[in-house]
Amino acid sequence: MPDPWESLHTTALLGTDRRPLPAADPAVPATGAVDRGDPATALLELAALETVRRRAGGLPRAATVPIDPPAPADGRPELPAPAARRLSLLLGTRPGGSSAVLANVAELLPQWLGTARARGFRPPAALVPSLLDAARARSELRPDAVVLAGPLGRWLAARNPDWRFVLRTTGDIPTPGEVPTTGDVPTTGEVPTTGGASAPGTPAPRPADGDHHLWHEGLFAERVTHLTALRRTDPAAGLALLQSTWPTERAEDRLLFLDALQEGLSAADEPFLEAALGDRSKNVRATAAELLSTLPGSALARRMAERARAAVRLSDRGTHLLVTPPAECDAAMQRDGIAPKSPTGRGERAWWFGEVIAAAPLSAWSEATGLTPDQLLALRVGDSLDETDGSWSDDLREAWARAAVRQQDAGWARALLGPAPAPAPQQRRARAPRPSGAPAKLLAVLPAEERAAWTAAFIEVHGLGEAFQLLGACATPWTPPLSTAVVAALARAAASGAYPWSHSGVLGMTERALAPETAAAVEELAAQSTPATAWAETFARLAGTLRFREAMLAELAA
């Protein structure tokens, strides 16, 4: 006897106009009561009856073992209950706060995540999906969110394609059962140099596939993540892994893989990078040259130092720096990453000159002249044919600034920035020239406390008009002196009649970066402002946000 379900299934596939409905089944009296006037409707009713009949005769099945293993255990302590409620609010999973008294609380999420990560907490499992959804929408959250989600986050990401970014994000994911040390975020120490390197294309021992399956099978972003993470723990192994597939990689992929070598970069990488100077891609060659220029003892650094000394020399009387820019960009210069054509529209000789100076070790100048950075910057700059011509001064200072940022040389960055600005009554000498290059980038080379102090002095003299990028270079939350300087500058701006939106960029930063201890001062400004004015509302919202952050950080300090 044919299976009734199969008969119905076949009729549905072929259509009721090509295959008649199954006859009524005497064993199932209800099938005879179906109205067969409309074959399509009758087919659906018969299918419903058959479904009920089949289910009614079903027997309970034996319990089966889940196919997937459960998520690994996470030994970190769970968030305190108040902090968990705060996270739910920041993620938007529960209501709270008002736009009338708070700034955009979603902008406080990065600070919350960074602090919670530093404290070594794990979120409640129920909030991990929302946390991953937030990180999916905002890439700047991913490093902290992935670490905070921990083993459960990775377990979920392996089962939900929407969260695949977790597998492509570099981070120190706690291993099952590991309890990270609470406290401040640890700084990365110097990675010891191990092993050597061979040139691109030279066969290298292939790492075990079981250890590096993501490198051989993963998506490009996953491979970059894997290489970066490996370079942080074992630079030599990371280099060997890159060498194992280097000849077969695409040019655009080689470029980003090469960029990952910044992690743990050392003299052991020089042979590989030196050979990469002959790569068929000009972008790869330029990146290899830039990496080599950050290694003061590299052969490229020595070649650039020789070119730089030929381009700039101390006059016989020691009162000038005489400039003789390169006359041509020869093949050797091109191999060392200098493009023969200026991409900036500057004159070619000025372009070559700037590239040579920026790539030369800054230590070479003191070695050649016996002068400190401050003394060198105080000298007049002239053309080798005309000592009174200062047309090369800006080019030289700008190139030195680039070198200071590239080589992370705090001494040169400090000299190029000049002393912190001082109010006119306290100035005992002419104001130093404005910093060369990008002051914010030079500031980023200095220690955090010094950055904050320099920026606070700048704001006291110049106000907030030019301080946006400088404030962005300062560590958050800002130090109390810097926070006090910013609040005082805001008070001056309000008193001058300026509108709050003329400082909207800085105000957006204050919500996230002002020290919460300044809340009382901001509340006082709100009380002193004319009610219902733009500044009164701005100060009230800022004060409310500072109180919110104060409570948020206190909850995470439990």
Image: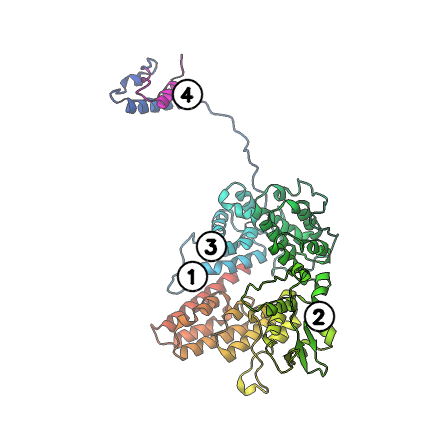
Q: Earlier in the sequence, mark 3 or mark 1?
A: 3
The image quarter containing residue 450 is bottom right
**Does 108 sit left or right of 366 as displayed?**
left
Q: Earlier in the sequence, mark 4 or mark 3?
A: 4
Residue 328 placement (x, y as % from top left): 64, 66
Using the rendered image of the protein, determine whether residue 133 is visible from the camera's viewpoint: yes
Q: Which mark is residue 104?
A: 1
Characterize the local packing of mark 1: few (<14), some (14-19) or many (20 or more) Cα atoms within 10 angstroms.
some
Q: CA distance from mark 4 to mark 3?
A: 48 Å
Characterize the local packing of mark 4: few (<14), some (14-19) or many (20 or more) Cα atoms within 10 angstroms.
few
Q: Earlier in the sequence, mark 4 or mark 1?
A: 4
Residue 413 placement (x, y as % from top left): 63, 72
Question: Which quadrant of the figure contains the C terminus?
Answer: bottom right
Disc 2 marks a residue whose amino acid type is Ser
Q: Taking 145 as reference, is 394 above or below it?
A: below
Front residue of this view, candidates 467 and 394: 394
SS class of the residue under badge 4?
loop
Question: Where is mark 3, residue-wise?
Answer: 85
69 within the magenta span? no
**Does 128 sit left or right of 180 as displayed?**
left
Q: Earlier in the sequence, mark 1 or mark 2?
A: 1
Q: Taking 341 as reference, is 196 above or below it?
A: above
